Amino acid sequence: MRLSVRRPGALVLMAALALGLRAAVARAQDSAPVRIGLTYAGGKPSVLVLPVNGPLGDSVRAILQRDLDYGDRVTVIGTESVVMDSASDGSRGQFNYPLYSRVGAAAMIQATLTETGLHVAVHDVSRQRVERVRDFALTAPPLSPAWRQQVHQASDAIEVWLTGSQGIAASRILYSSGGRIWQIDSDGANPTPLTPASPPALYPAWHPKASHIAYAVQTDDGTRIVIREMGSAGNASRTLTAPRGSVNTSPAFSQPDGETLLYAHGQESGTDIFAVPTFGHESPRRVTVSRGLDAVSPTVSPDGRRIVYVTNKSGGLALYIADADGTNAEVLAGGSFGDRSQRTDPSWSPDGRTIAFQAEMDGNTQIYTVGIRDLRIRQFTNQGRNEDPSWAPDSRHVVFTSNRSGSWQLWVLDTESNRVRQLTHAAAGAKAGAWSPRLTVP
């Protein structure tokens, strides 16, 4: 339940040599998930993505450029005059490294469409050599959502090579809009409804293996939790049974296995966190005991040992941390009843270090984080109202809801640079984003 009370001379690489190097470089280097030894003068490395051959080449290049840009760990060089001067480099088998260097490139990405997929070579500009080579399968229908996800996976691998950190391009975000649950790619493409318009659905959550989602639906008998299988031919789902008229909302899967679903259940005597097997039919068990007050919005630590939730048992709404069974509960980020502050909608980062949440001070909500160990609180937004934070799988980016554009839409925040970008442009607005784990597309 969301409570609103809520970078020297040219080197000629012959084409045959490049082909001969392909398998050896891939075997020797691609297996190690660490960055290549790029040399550049501080800050983020600048990267040039060469034009890609073929009728789908412009789309592939655009996706790679956008993914690397949105990862916020490299600077993508977009000087089109440089691109045009170097457009035929790949087909000639020679590369104008001095030109790349003059525009500040530490690395150059050479992508080539093949009969079976995408061949990618990453060049170190200062060393004037190929550092990484790999072939990525593109088996899905061209330009389909699955095809785009396969290109996103190539982007994430390139980001590992360049920075040592895996990207978040091959992920999606769930959200609520117009009474339906939707999903959208991490770059804002392919908004797709997943549920019918009725009954109204809200507060989606991802299973840690992305095999299922959970969400709440509003029915004549109360609010119910639905667990739905993703990618199944019949969109198989089941609704958790609950007493007539009860409120059941804010689902969250256990980590890292997803075998348990936590949710808030309430009747006339307050609201508590309950847990139920995700795939079984056992009765739910109570996790918190609020004694007529409220405990809602659970989020689970990556190791599954602890939970953070919202409760009003200290007066104002505050974040509490407890063991997974509800014991040893204590305040994590408190609320002050006197100034009407609220600390709600927590999201536990995948690296386990930080909780993102929203706080309301005198009627204005903003996005904050609190460190699990040092309890340091940081504020990240100050424009408009900002709510519903959810961490990306890199524990660096957060998707959140904001009305800064004039309507409620999803935005993405980079917590290291404070860069913000708009993700959705939904006519009916978008709220309650939930970022998926990294996705694997065959």
Image (tube, helix red, strand yellow):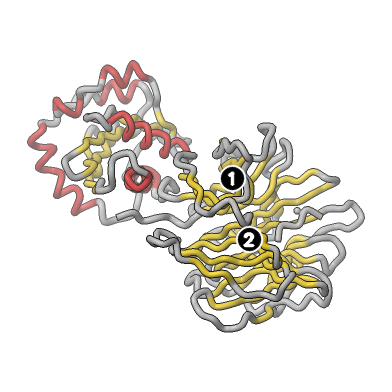
Taking 101 as reference, is 436 above or below it? Answer: below
The residue at 58%/57% (across/down) is 204
Question: Between 306 and 438, which is closer to the camera in this rendering?
Answer: 438
Which amino acid type is marked by label 1? Thr
In terms of secondary structure, where does tag 1 sit? Answer: loop
Residue on which the image places disc 2? 217
2 or 1: mark nearer the eye: 2
The residue at 85%/46% (across/down) is 362
Q: Seen in the image, is 112 located left or right of residue 291?
A: left
| Residue 49 in the image, given as x and y percentages of width and height | 32, 31
**Mark 2 or mark 1, earlier in chain:** 2
Q: Residue 415 — which label?
A: 1
Find the residue positioned furthest to the right: 338
| Crowd around label 1: few <14 · some 14–19 · many ≥20 (10 Å) | some
Question: Between 373 and 389, which is closer to the camera in this rendering?
Answer: 389
The residue at 19%/29% (across/down) is 90
In terms of secondary structure, where does tag 2 sit? Answer: strand
Q: How many marks?
A: 2
| Residue 161 in the image, given as x and y percentages of width and height | 33, 46
- Locate the C terminus by quadrant: bottom left
